[in-house]
Image (tube, rainbow, N blue to C red):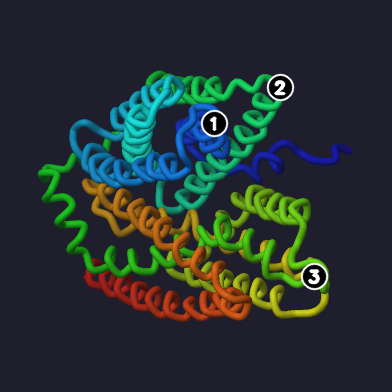
Amino acid sequence: MKLFRRPQLASWFPQLSYQVWLLAFGRLLSQVGSGFTLFYAPIFFVNQVGLSATSVGLGLGSASISGVVGRVFGGSLSDAAFGRKRTVLLSAGISAIAAVVLAATLNFPMFVLGNLLMGFGVGLYWPSTEAMVADMTGPEQRNEAFALNRLSDSLGLGVGVVLGGLLISTTGAYRLLFVVDGISFVVLFAVVYWAIVEPKHVTGKHALATGWRIALSDRQLLTYAVVNVLFTTYIVQTSSALPLFFSNFVVVSPTAPGFSSVIISALFTWHLLLAAISQLPIARALNRFSRCQALILSASLWGSGFACVWWTGVTSVAHLIWAALALTILAMATVTYMPAASSLVVDLAPESLRGVYLAANSQCWAIGYFIGPLLGGWAMDQSPPIARGYWLVLAMTIFGAIAILQVLNRMMNRIDILGQK
């Protein structure tokens, strides 16, 4: 008797077009290259090129500025006759050039130029690739399709960070990291150029400014944007403020002000591993809920996770258990949010403006990643009562997020009813 049958095994995988799988594979390879430079770029440019830490911070920040511009053009070009595929190819080409510039950088102006190009290329990438995924799938498949691509991004970054660390430890050749990053973008270009056939989409007849004016006058999109900035602000706390909190404000014992670096590393490895494992199953489970209901569930999980973080800081027992529980819940909150958020934006968007709407969604990430580190950094610079209370305040904000999502759900239902009449 066979222990399992192939059809049962295949049923665990998303039933998606091979084009979606090929795009996910290309994204994974590209993110491997990005992972090579993710943590090591500041070390290289400060310790070996000789730039000051302030200069490196300014240079890296310049990528965020050009990224905002890139998202605007990425959304508009995706909706125009230029198309999603050509925009992804343009993004990969510009990003490859940026990696070459960074590999050759010897001074601050070259460093800024490389980061401006990289930010612009990445800005072009997100709305165009997500619009391409939306074109390749139906409404019932999008949760899993977006989850698959996010999983590819996460796995690629993780593999890249590990391989980059091995390369540095064995060769010390930091510039080679940027060469590998550039090659990964060339590979992405090749995969998209040769293997992806862009589905037909309704080409927008709007001028660049007109498409954005339509999107920014859409009350549903603007309502969603408010709550989406909250979600992205939550996400960045996990990587910015939470490690500092576990290190400095959890009183494990009278002589230990926080968890050791080994324990913190183990906790966040668990968080990332759980998110990767559960991404696809949760995306499939979310198909039984509306997009707003899935996001309400995510908000509830964020609140519960932040409450557990707060309790980790104030309790006198079982700190590690509470910390592990907090990161478990926050992993579930993240993977519940990711596919539902992108799918909701596609539902809101006219087909001819999917690129612009997804670019607006991507801008929410830019805002959240600007606000989040500032708030978290300020809180972690304060006294222990304020640093601990910060997580309780974050947990309370989810009631506002849930209220906004309920309003949005009513707005969408009302429009659906009117559209059926």
- Closer to us: 230 or 214: 230
Instruction: Please state which amino acid type lies under the numbered disc 2.
Output: Thr
Q: Residue furthest right?
A: 1
In percent of width and height, residue 29 lies at 54, 28
In space, the residues marked 2 and 1 are separated at their CA atoms by: 15 Å
Closest to the camera, between mark 3 and mark 1, is 1
- Mark 1 and mark 2 in contact (Cβ < 8 Å)? no
- Asked which secondary structure carries label 3, the reply is loop
Is residue 19 in view?
A: yes
Q: Amino acid at mark 1?
A: Phe
User: Which residue is disc 2 drawn over?
Assistant: 170
Which residue is found at the position 60% from the left and 20% from the top? Answer: 173
Image quadrant where residue 167 sits: top right
Q: Which residue carries the number 1 mark? A: 44
- Where residue 356 is drawn, which disc sits there? none
Residue matched to label 3: 252
Distance of label 3 from label 1 (alpha carbons): 35 Å
Compare residues 371 and 213 and report the one nearer the observer: 371
Viewer-nearest of discs 2 and 1: 1
Q: Amino acid at mark 3?
A: Val
Answer with mark 3 or mark 1, whichever residue precedes in sequence.
Answer: 1
Q: Position of residue 299 (x, y in %)?
A: 51, 71
Residue 304 x %, y %: 61, 74
